[in-house]
Image (spheres, grey):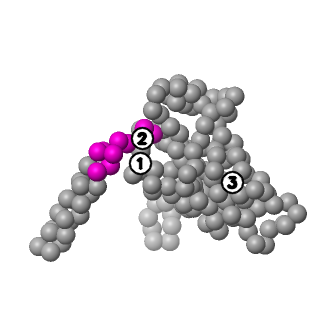
């Protein structure tokens, strides 16, 4: 159905939901920058996370820490260990959960099977790199990573320093 607008141009009127894509409010809670320094990130998966009680409110407040966090696969489930979510002060004191408890990650069965195959190979780890919200749901970017050797880390730091110097020279000219 085509209608005329006030200015005389033709505007297409469609069904609700057509046209603009749904807004994706990706609010990043925390990132694991050390993972990018210590590991070569090969592939990243977006996973859901099972949370209880006031943990979602704590995440929205940004009270999470990914340092020393890792994932492992046990009995066909992906488990996240050492994700520290600090409880809110306003939270119910009777039902407080331990901040470093093990949490379950939500992935499709095919993705879990792929990760099982890759992690059985020598030298592959599952490292969470980012915690964020998409469309109101808490998500974790879980990366399949391989540890860097010491000389790789040094080389990466040298490349970064050279890039920084080049950028300074371009800005000054």
* Residue at the image position 73 percent from the left and 68 percent from the top: 88
Q: Is residue 65 magenta?
A: no
Q: Which residues are magenta?
A: 145-154
List the residue tagged with mark 1. Answer: 38
Q: Is residue 148 magenta?
A: yes
- Check if mark 3's residue and mark 1's residue have beta carbons within 8 Å: no
* Residue at the image position 15 percent from the left and 68 percent from the top: 170
List the residue tagged with mark 2. Answer: 147
Q: What SS does tag 2 mark?
A: strand
Badge 1: how crowded within 10 Å, few (<14), some, or many (20+)? some
Q: Earlier in the sequence, mark 2 or mark 3?
A: 3
Distance Cα–Cα, label 2 vs label 3: 24 Å
Q: Is residue 110 left or right of residue 96?
A: left
Q: Is residue 160 left or right of residue 92?
A: left
Note whether residue 67 is visible.
Answer: yes
- Check if mark 2's residue and mark 1's residue have beta carbons within 8 Å: yes
Q: How many marks?
A: 3
* Residue at the image position 56 percent from the left and 27 percent from the top: 116
Distance Cα–Cα, label 3 vs label 1: 22 Å
Badge 2: how crowded within 10 Å, few (<14), some, or many (20+)? some
Note whether residue 26 is visible.
Answer: no
Farthest residue, direction left: 173
Farthest residue, direction front: 150
Q: Which of the labelled discs sits on residue 100, or is there none?
A: 3
Q: Earlier in the sequence, mark 3 or mark 1?
A: 1
Against 145, residue 116 (above or below) is above
Q: Which of the labelled discs sits on residue 82, or is there none?
A: none
């Amino acid at each position: 159905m085509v209608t005329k607008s006030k200015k005389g141009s033709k505007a297409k009127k469609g069904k609700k939901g057509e046209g603009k894509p749904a807004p994706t409010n990706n609010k990043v809670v925390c990132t694991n920058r050390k993972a990018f320094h210590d590991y070569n990130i090969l592939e990243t998966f977006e996973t859901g996370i099972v949370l209880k009680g006031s943990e979602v409110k704590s995440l929205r407040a940004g009270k999470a820490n990914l340092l020393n966090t890792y994932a492992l696969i046990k009995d066909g489930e992906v488990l996240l260990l050492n994700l520290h979510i600090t409880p809110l002060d306003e939270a119910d004191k009777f039902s407080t959960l331990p901040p470093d408890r093990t949490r379950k990650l939500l992935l499709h069965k095919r993705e879990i099977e792929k990760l099982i195959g890759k992690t059985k190979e020598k030298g592959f780890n599952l490292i969470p790199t980012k915690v964020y919200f998409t469309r109101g749901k808490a998500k974790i970017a879980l990366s399949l990573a391989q540890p860097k050797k010491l000389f790789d880390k040094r080389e990466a730091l040298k490349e970064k320093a050279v890039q920084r110097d080049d950028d300074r020279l371009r800005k000054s000219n």
